[in-house]
Structure formats: structure tokens, C-alpha cells
Amino acid sequence: MFSKILIANRGEIACRIIKTARRMGIKTVAVYAEADAQAQHVKLADEAVFIGPSPASESYLVGQKIIDAAKATGAEAIHPGYGFLSENPDFVEAVEKAGLTFIGPKAHSIRSMGLKDAAKRLMEEAGVPVVPGYHGDNQDAAFLAGQADEIGYPVLIKASAGGGGKGMRRVDKAADFISSLDSCRREAKSAFGDDRVLIEKYVLSPRHIEVQVFGDSHGNIVHLFERDCSLQRRHQKVIEEAPAPGMSEPVRSAMTRAAIKAAEAVNYQGAGTIEFIVDGSGPLRADGFWFMEMNTRLQVEHPVTEAITGFDLVEWQLRVAAGEALPVKQGSIAIHGHAAEARLYAEDPAAGFLPQAGHIDSLEFGLGDGVRIDGGVVSGDQVSPFYDPMIAKVIAHGPGRQDALGRLQEALDNTLVSGLTTNRDFLRALVGNDTFRAGRMDTGLIDRNLERLIEKPEPSEIAIAIAAVIASRIEPSSAHLGFRLWGAADHRIKLLFNGEMIERGLRLQDGVISLHGGNQSLQLADILMGESFEAKAHLGNRSVRVRAKICATEKAGFLDVSILLDGQTFVFTRPDPVAGDAALHSSSNDVLAPMTGVVRMVLVSAGDVVSAGERLAVMEAMKMEHTLTAPRDGEVQDVLCAEGDPVEGGAVLIRLKEEE
Ligand code: ADP
Ligand code: ADP
Ligand code: MG
């Protein structure tokens, strides 16, 4: 076995690999770019090597820097994680040429599966069912349109070199084909430097079911059953589970046999995944699934497979790379219970899943039986605009599907992230969705239910009361007893929630706080405030015990109060008491940066007359573009940013002249 390995990745997956290496007594070397100097993977590793500027293209994607770092530290092998260099066959060859071991498949396996069209041809020859369509070399637009007609609409145009859900267009009718082809090609060219495409029949009511496979250098290949990853947004997985709901033994056996055949066709070694698109319009059928692509690496969602099989797949990767045979035979791999994973992202589902960057004021997970958290950041860390904004994966395992989903729900209910917007509430709503709970989902479920999934509930009077008490800054008199209130005092508290002003009167008497001004009057007694907030609340003739997780952070005179109550998060802001009301109404004169990122284009200058909705500037964060538009008709007074400027979320970028 290796005595030292280098991990050519960052964040959650780098931390995950370090954990297993440490358990196996293997030393680890991290690499890091500028933005990651304080990152968890750097802190956890035994050694760390700086590899350059923050953009991945100048650090994590530069193979030579990584190989140099491995040589300099005496690491014998390189684990690529996922993303970055994990599916780059040239990198694999360079690693081997340098006398090091690549912890993953051979370059030829990656190459054969790297382009979707070539992979599909290969699979066809191997007798694996592939989605009907055209995956040949002719790229003439009129020819491709003819192929689409023959396949029958709807069709899916896919970038041959695509990945990560990019470079894909569904086309419903012939009239739209050419314009979709053009835009798909443009996206493919800029994302992958390759504008070749293939055309596939769009499978209706599609489910995404994939099979985990594993090969070694002794000719053994096994599967570790399937995962269902049908809950997707923009063709990207959001929640994954294993086994697949509604899977029958005959279908499973057909699917896993096809997966093994696929892996055998490329002499596969290491961890890999065969992705199938499945007809989900009725019960699963042995003739109702088709090969989509093979991911020649460890997958983000591998923990659900680990949960149900009891094996550590990173350990297997290390053993196989070191030349050992797979630790078990197919017959000893069995399914125990059910597992599900949710990807917790710094993103705003209500704003088209716009990635968020910024400071994590507080990060607290709901832990419970069968719950595992794979994370890459902790309270106080930064989510950088340069990389994938994933905060953590929440994985739950239980005896049956409902147990696992119940545990996942509870873990999410008790997870509080303060400081930036996340998809936590969205994930909760999704796990609670009836169709999903019944196992009747397809890849369109999120889009169809989007409005309901991103609904933001109004805060209850109790949530407002807790925020008001925290914002009032009433001092605890004895640290030992927690939060104790003495004497009488009156406070008026103003809080902003979702841009709306809430005002309440607080009266403190004999340790009881009465709240006035809402549609219900309310008292809080027996208040204890520490890590969490506890009290007895009296509402009319009702009395309830209240327990909430809280986080209060002061920012430039404002106080942000996050409250996690009954599974729901509410974020209130107490405006700067000195600045007065004017500062509150983020005036409609100002155009703010919606997230931390880089200004890509400034389209106006001072003195320009603009109309409501007109494009003013374009920002980029985490590989996504965001256009800033004029909030109203008016004249540009100031442009406070320039192209290329890094800006913080909330910064004023453009100011309009005060209206007369
Ligand atoms: P999975 O099925 O494992 O989610 P994806 O293809 O969506 O597979 O990508 C896996 C991970 O790799 C994602 O979390 C994403 O951040 C990262 N990734 C995908 N494409 C790229 C890329 N071109 N550059 C860097 N990272 C990428
Ligand atoms: P990527 O490399 O971006 O992961 P995939 O080929 O794996 O691309 O497809 C990503 C997702 O797009 C799938 O998980 C599925 O939801 C959807 N998809 C792909 N092919 C089809 C198809 N032929 N019919 C319906 N949906 C599809
Ligand atoms: Mg895929």
C-alpha cells in the first residue's frame, strides 16, 4: 500500500479522501490555490502545497503543477477526486510518465468513454442498449435535422464532449431544431472547446438510474447495485438514493449485467458509474433502460452506495490502485436497507438556483441515527466564487425507504446555515414532496413543482418574537443560569423580513417578555438563551414549549438574525439604529451585486438614460452569468464598478439619479 498520496482536489471530496487515507495509515498531501489557503482540506491534510491563483485553470487544472507537487513531497500516487482532472486521460499518462500512480482507471478506459458519441458506438458493439439516436461523425446541420425527424420528436441534442449537465437542449418540434442546435453548439464550444453534438430520442417520463461498478487489475469487475438520481435541476442531480424505488429483481439483474458488460468493454479498473436513462412511465422494465454515459471516476453520490453495502469505496480505490485484488466477490455484496443523499449548496433556488458566495457565519447540522455529513467547510469559512458552491452532502441510512427519507428530512430540519442563502429549505420541501415519497418521480419533478418547492413561508409570531428578543439585546444577568431577565423595560423593535418591515413592542417584566403589535399577543417565559433559544410561549389560551437554533451576526451596523424553528429558517435583519430608516429601504436608486463575484461587462456610463429592465451590467460567479437590469426608468448617476472588478454580494454597482 502507498505510504503517501496527493489529493488533486479541494472541498468536500478532498476531505472525504483524507479521512479514509488517515484511517488506513496513509499520509496525505493537499494542494491549494490562493482562495483556499484557509480551507478545510488544507488543514486536514498532513502536508499542503500551494499551486497558484484561484481560478482552477491556473491551479487545480494544471496537471504539471500537481505532478511537481507530488514529486516534491514524495507522494507515490495521485487521487483526482471528481471534476477537475479526474477524467483527463492526458493527465493520467503524464502522471504515469512521472513514475507515479493515478488512483483511477487507465487512460485508454477514460478515452473510450470520454466522448459520448464514441462511447455509445462502443456500447452498441458490446451489446449494451443505447438510447436510439444519431451518434455519427456527420455534423452538417441539415443532415442532423433530418436525423431528428427520423428519430421523432422530442429529441435531445447533446454535446459529444459534454458533462455536468451543460451543452444539452431538448427540442420538441422540427421548427425549433436549427436554433437549438446553434445555441447548443455555442455552449459546447465555450464550455468544452468542442462543438460536436449527437442527437438522442428524448425519453418521456425519464428516470436516471445508474450502476456503481468496480474493477481491479486482476480482471475482476463487480457491481454495487444501483442509485436513483432522478431528482434533478438543469440536468444536475439534487437528491440521490439507493436502491432505486420500484426496482424488481429481473430489471436489476438486466441492468447490472449491462453495466458489467460496459465496464468489461473498456477493461475497467477502479470506481466507475454506468448511467442509464430509464422509461419511468410505468413499472420498470428489463427492456426499458438505455446507456447514457459512463463516469470514469468516483461519483458525488457514492456515499449512498457505501451506506447500503457497508464498504468504503475510497478504500477500494486505494487498494485497487496499489495493485490489490478487489476485497470481495460479487456474491458477498448485498443491499442493507435504504439510503438517500441531499446536496446542500450555497445557491438561491428562488433566483434560478443562482450560486452564492460569501462568509458562512454559522453552520450546524442535524445529526441523528444513520446520518452522515460529508462536508468541506465549517462555520467561519468562505464559500468562494471560484468553485462549485457545494457546502456539504447530507446522507441518511435506514432500514427502509421511508426511514431513510424521514431521517434525511429530520437532518435537514435541524440544519442551520447562516450568512448566505442555501438550498436547504428547497431540499426539505423536496424530500417532503408526495410524489417523491411515493417513489413515482421522474427527472421533470422539480421543474413541474418549482413554485411550491421555493415558496417561502411567512414567519410565525413566535419566530418574530424570538428575533425581536435577540435584536433587543436584552442582557443576560447571569451567565451561569443562562438567559435570565429581571426588572421592567420597554423596547420598540424594527425588523426587516424579505424586504418588509415588521414592528413590535417588547415589554419585559418579572422575567416575562410580552410582545405587542402583531395580530396575536404573545408572552415568552422561562427564557434560556445559549447555543439555542428555549422558552415557554403563551399565545391566547395556548402554551407551547419553543426551541430554536439561532445565529446573530453583526454586519456594518446591521444585525442579521437567523432562526431555525420547526424545521423552517427565517432570516431577519435589524437595521442600523444610527443610520435610521433611510438606510433600510435599499433604495430603488441602487443596483446591487446579487452575489459575490466578478463584474464581466459594464454596459452603461454616467449620464445614460435607461428604461426599466434594461441591461446595465453582467456579473459572473461560479461559472454562471447574471445580468443586472435597471429597476426603473431613469438616468445613471454613477457607475461604481469596472469590468474585471471582484465585488462582494450586496455592493452597490450602479446608482441611478434620484427621481424628481
Ligand atoms: P455527478 O453525477 O457525480 O454529479 P457531474 O458530471 O455532475 O457528475 O460532476 C461531478 C462533479 O464534478 C460536480 O460536482 C462538478 O462540480 C464537477 N465538475 C463537473 N464538470 C466539471 C468541470 N468541467 N470542471 C470542474 N469541475 C467539474
Ligand atoms: P452529463 O454528462 O451532463 O451528466 P448525461 O448524458 O449524463 O450528461 O445526461 C444528464 C441528464 O440529462 C440525465 O441525468 C437525464 O436527466 C437527462 N437526459 C440525458 N439523456 C436523456 C434522454 N435521452 N432523454 C431524457 N433525458 C435525458
Ligand atoms: Mg451524466
Image (cartoon, helix red, strand yellow):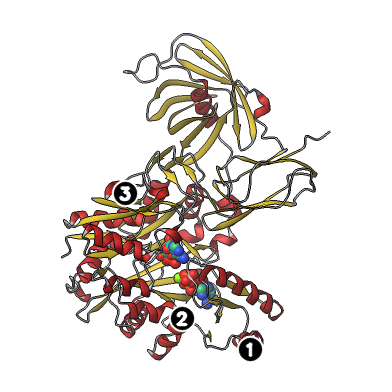
Which percent across, then down, holds residue 376?
36, 50
Q: Tell me the residue at 54%/72% (across/down).
A: 205
Disc 1 from disc 2: Cα separation = 28 Å
Which kind of residue does numbered mark 3 sit on? Val
How crowded pointer 1 is (Cα within 10 Å; few <14, some 14-19, many 20+) is rated as few
Q: How many marks?
A: 3
Q: Which residue is mark 2?
A: 288
The nearer-to-camera label among 1 and 3 is 3
Q: Earlier in the sequence, mark 1 or mark 2?
A: 1
The numbered mark at residue 87 is none
Residue under the image location 28 percent in, 67 percent down: 335
Q: Are marks 1 and 3 in contact (CB under 8 Å)?
A: no
Q: Is residue 202 above or below residue 150?
A: above
421 w.r.t. 32: above or below: above
Q: What residue is drawn where x is 44% and y is 32%?
A: 550
At mark 3, the secondary structure is helix
What distance separates the C-alpha of mark 3 from that of mark 2? 45 Å
Residue marked by disc 1: 143
Residue 390, horizontal then vertical, whole percent: 44, 53
Q: Which sits in the foreground, 474 or 13?
A: 13
Percent across and percent down for residue 84 are 40, 64
Q: Which mark is residue 42?
A: 3
Quadrant assignment for the C terminus: top right
The amino acid type of the residue labelled 1 equals Phe
**Left or right for 463, reference 254:** right
Q: What distance separates the C-alpha of mark 1 from that of mark 3?
A: 51 Å
Rendered view: 453 above or below 521: below
Furthest-top residue in view? 487
Q: Is residue 256 left or right of residue 147?
A: left
Counting from the top left corner in percent of width and height, residue 644 is at: 58, 51
Whether residue 229 is visible, yes or no, is no
Q: Secondary structure at mark 2?
A: loop
